[in-house]
Amino acid sequence: MFVIMDESTIGKNPIDAALGERLRGLRETRRLSLADLGRAIGTSYQQVRNYEAGQNRISAATLYRLSQTLDVEISYFFKDLPTNAALGSRVPSANEATRWVSLEQIDNPEVRRHMLGLLDALARRD
């Protein structure tokens, strides 16, 4: 299933931004450069910079490597995060919910193929 996103749903995820701030704080406390931390977890300094800025999501495996490298529990990254209400999470309205579509519901194989291509292209934007 997928949802067609509009401009109000595109942008930095508040959780990603909060994790990035925690990561930056830990890195700076440990006096590690972006490059040092990147090498330690097997990625580039640019990727670490993107994590810290909340531009890229941190995978579970990377979060594990970060916690090991920075000598903190994984839970450190999630302590005292704002609640869903504070993040602006909401249940979609009935009108918005009708925009959810399953690819299996699309009978035309050509349209289904194009939708898959569009979803793949959008996924690569993250």
Image (spheres, rainbow, N blue to C red):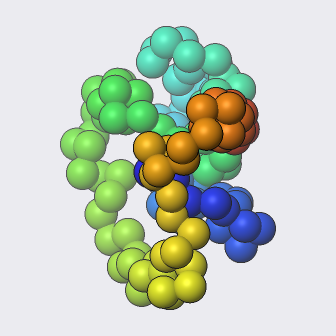
Q: Is residue 76 visible?
A: yes
Give the x, y percent position of residue 6: 72, 67
**Of 91 and 114, which appears nearest the observer?**
114
Extreme front residue here?
107
Which picture quadrant has residue 50?
top right
Residue for point 34% across, 27% down: 61
**Of 7 and 94, which appears nearest the observer?**
94
Residue for point 77% across, 68% down: 7
Give the x, y percent position of residue 44: 64, 17
Q: Is 75 drawn above or below residue 7 in the view shown? A: above
Q: Is 24 drawn above or below residue 13 in the view shown? A: above
Looking at the image, residue 22 sits to the left or right of residue 24; the answer is left
Which picture quadrant has residue 96?
bottom right
Give the x, y percent position of residue 77: 36, 52
Give the x, y percent position of residue 119: 64, 40
Looking at the image, residue 113 sits to the left or right of residue 3; the answer is right
Quadrant for the C terminus, please.
top right
Q: Is residue 66 visible?
A: no
Which picture quadrant has residue 66?
top left
Q: Is 96 drawn above or below residue 10 in the view shown? A: below
Looking at the image, residue 102 sits to the left or right of residue 36; the answer is left
Extreme right residue here?
7
**Of 24 and 46, which appears nearest the observer?**
46
Residue for point 36% across, 79% down: 83
Instruction: Give the number of callouts.
Output: 0
Residue for point 29% across, 52% down: 76
Looking at the image, residue 49 sits to the left or right of residue 25; the answer is right
